[in-house]
Image: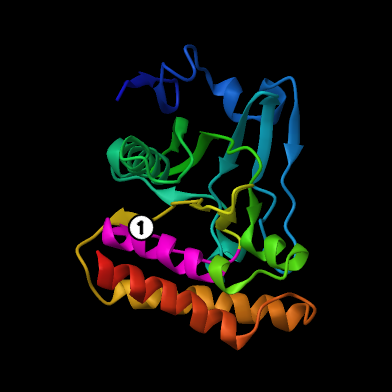
Amino acid sequence: MTETVEKTTTGAILYDKAIINQISDDRFIPGGWPHAEVLGGTLGSGGRGNTMFVGNVPRQFVLRHYRRGGLIGRLIRDHYVFSGADKTRSFMEWRLLDKLSASNMRVPRPAAARYCQRGTFYTADIITVRIPGVVALSQYIADNDADEAFWHSVGASIYEFHAAGVYHADMNAYNLQVDKSGALWMLDFDKGSLRPPGRWQQMTLGRLHRSLRKIVGLDPTLHFRAANWEQLLEGYFNASRSA
């Protein structure tokens, strides 16, 4: 790990010098890059306009501004109570991704994170290395009528994360992404953590199931049926039995 922390006038920036050798607040705004492109959301994914692709090919990054969701997000868009730099959303996610990347888990590699403190509150941003050629699982099943082997592999991949104790706070059909080889990646680890085995494993599976059913309700032409979910579970539990 090549973690470096630099103080700023309003907070601090945490970054990996092996990826970005110089960092400033400018890198956390679209105008600080030669190219910036808003990542749009489809099929009810929300997205809240807080995520952008920045930089130029072949080295592109994903810049994400932390925003609240749900009902509270309508009142307080992007402010959080400050209780120390190490407890900010951005620093915690950066360090979790750093651990997972070091263990060769299929997650984005963290590049930089920052927080800006304003009194008792702060705002936050994170920059990760863009994974080439991935699409959201929601898009994948819109474009492909995936076979049983694919759904088995999705279940087995989720079990791989769970076996490593990786808790994803919002495991849905958008944060699960599929690369060109069909391998599964997990994105957006805000509020994620490492945990011992527990009920959270079944709870995150249930969250994914609800997400898939929701997007099929929005677009019935998507290639997802009840049998596919059973195939995913079969892949998950087969992986658990052979571990």
Q: Which residue is found at the position 50% from the left and 49% from the top?
A: 79
Could you say which is closer to the camera, residue 162 or residue 20? 162
Tell me the magenta residue range: 151-173
| 10 relative to 223 in the view: left or right | left
Q: How many marks?
A: 1
Expressed as whole percent of the image width and height from the top left, the position of residue 69 reads 56, 63
Question: Does residue 76 belong to the magenta stretch?
Answer: no
Q: Quadrant of residue 240?
A: bottom left
| 99 relative to 130 in the view: left or right | left
Residue marked by disc 1: 161
Expressed as whole percent of the image width and height from the top left, the position of residue 159 reads 36, 65
Q: Which residue is found at the position 53% from the left and 81% from the top?
A: 229
- State the quadrant of the N terminus: top left
Assign a secondary structure to mark 1: helix
Q: Which residue is found at the position 58% from the left and 86% from the top?
A: 227
Expressed as whole percent of the image width and height from the top left, the position of residue 62 reads 60, 37
Q: Quadrant of residue 217?
A: bottom right
Q: Where 163 falls versus 91 (above or below)?
A: below
Q: Residue furthest top?
A: 22
- State the quadrant of the C terminus: bottom left
Q: Quadrant of residue 102?
A: top left
Q: Which residue is found at the position 30% from the left and 44% from the top?
A: 87
| Amino acid type of the residue tagged 1 in the rendering | Phe
Q: Where 74 falls versus 40 (above or below)?
A: below
Classify 10 Å Cα crowding around label 1: few (below 14), some (14-19), many (20 and above): some
Q: Is residue 119 visible?
A: yes
Expressed as whole percent of the image width and height from the top left, the position of residue 35 reads 75, 25
Q: Is residue 171 visible?
A: no
Q: Where 16 falls versus 144 (above or below)?
A: above
Could you say which is closer to the camera, residue 165 or residue 78? 165
Question: Does residue 157 belong to the magenta stretch?
Answer: yes
